[in-house]
Image (tube, helix red, strand yellow):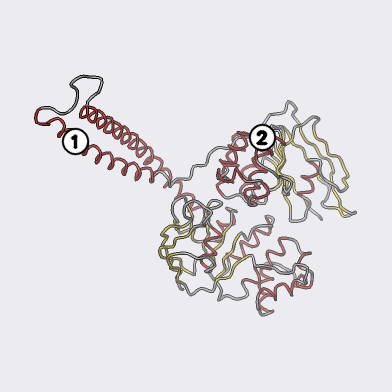
Amino acid sequence: MSTIKIQHLTFGFDAQEGLLFDQTSLNLDESWKLGLIGRNGRGKTTFLQLLMGKLPHTGSIQHKANFVYFPQTIQDKQALTHEVLTEISVFEEWKLKREMNGLQLSWELLWQPFATLSGGEQTKLLLALLFTDDTRFPLLDEPTNHLDIPSRKQVATYLKNKKQGFIVVSHDRQFIDEVVNHILAIEKTQLLLYQGNFTTYEQEKQNKDTFEVEQNKKIAKEITRLKSSRIEKSNWAISREADNHGNPTIKGSGGTGHDGFVSAKAKRMMKRSKAISGRIEKQIAEKEQLLKNIEYLEPLVMDFRPSHKERLVSAENLTLSYDEKQLFLPVSFTLEKGERLAIIGANGSGKSSLIQQLSGHFTGKSSGNCHLASSLSISCVRQNYEDNLGTLPDFAKKNKIDYQVFLMNLKKLGMERTVFEQKIEQMSMGQRKKVELAKSLSTPAELYIWDEPLNYLDLFNHKQLEALLHDVKPSMIFVEHDPTFVSRVATKTVLLTQD
């Protein structure tokens, strides 16, 4: 297979401080199934755009690959699905049918308006279209968006069985684990290539970080010693300078004496001191550069207030409906203090509607019983937070949360300080999601109700939240499609079904 050769790639946006890629060189085999991972804002999507030649850069990217990007741009979502796919790409019908069968999609979907399909169906159809031509090299940017757990497993199996290579960006650890055989990690100061899946990457990175932490302790100690030495040399030079020129308040003071001996010696020593100080400054800069390679996940703060009541939520034969259409079969469950209940089910099974019912915002009809403990303080993370507006100080004041704790959580989630000055409506979707999450974390509550909290967050944020919930053990009801997060956080689950 051919090789994608990247030589001295350098790129950065004008509005950003520093470069996203600086003299990056590596070779990627086109037969690899490569997982591209890294923190939000590190340049994953930018890297894909650079491969496709859509951004100006210095250095070179040499390849013979026919890159094709997912998700494709759709001009008219109201058109029939077959027309939408025809607008995007030329394909042979039998090949599309083959790929749709591989994703268990009905051929009848092609004759429905694209807008009427579920998010999962739209995603799978676009993937099927992408793989109708095996001469292309797919660049898959977040293909797990809008997919429930069964659909994610389905797409993972589909990609795993593909013979052609691809690059995939995803924040779903289990998905990445199942489909890739190489990992390209965009880390703090460099791109690192690993052979294996995400589990292999995590193990190797943990070993490397453990070693670097010990090295960093030694480096930090050496920096402290060098800085002390620099101060000593600087103080010595200043005192010799004073000796040389003399103290105007002391008669006869000064460095000029017998044949100017003291003055000449002082000048030589000062020159030597400045040279040593310069070398020390260089050593300090080099040592400090070595401290930048480790990702430190700072612990988040959650203002959980345990309720004095043992049972917080109970539901018996509860079901919800819109326009006489039942969303799910009746369910019964309870939530005791300190439990974390995960609501699971297929796309469209009513998970978010149940979350809205529990938080008092469902606008349809309900039957059965649903009871929340009286005077219960609740903090929510919503899927739709377009009403989060204004400056951060005004937002914190409006929501009656501690502004400093709110900012601290935003910073720990990876939001740059330069963003703090923007209005929320001017922020990116990922930044706005962090505002919604930081608001919930900073709100004093006895119960947390979270609807897909991991959307737009990177793998490092996932780990932060897992660690926080493991330590704090709050009372919580949540919806999330990441099976790893669900298995590590939930103490119990309730399954919503439609038949």
Residue type of the residue flagged with mark 2 = Pro
Q: Where does the image place residue 67, in percent across and percent down from the top left? A: 55, 71
Q: Indicate the quadrant containing the C terminus: top left, top right, bottom left or bottom right.
A: bottom right
Q: Is residue 465 above or below residue 12?
A: above
Closer mark to the observer between disc 2 and disc 1: 1
Within 10 Å of disc 1 (Cα), the crowding (few <14, some 14-19, many 20+) is some
Residue shown at 71%/41% (left/top)?
341
Secondary structure category for the residue under label 2: loop
The residue furthest right is: 324
Within 10 Å of disc 2 (Cα), the crowding (few <14, some 14-19, many 20+) is many
- Which of the two residues, 354 or 392, is positioned nearer the viewer here? 392
Secondary structure category for the residue under label 1: helix
Q: Which residue is the site of mark 1?
A: 267
Q: Is residue 208 left or right of residue 247?
A: right
Q: Where does the image place residue 314, in percent across and percent down from the top left? A: 80, 37
Q: Earlier in the sequence, mark 2 or mark 1?
A: 1
Q: Which residue is the site of mark 2?
A: 474
Residue type of the residue flagged with mark 1 = Lys
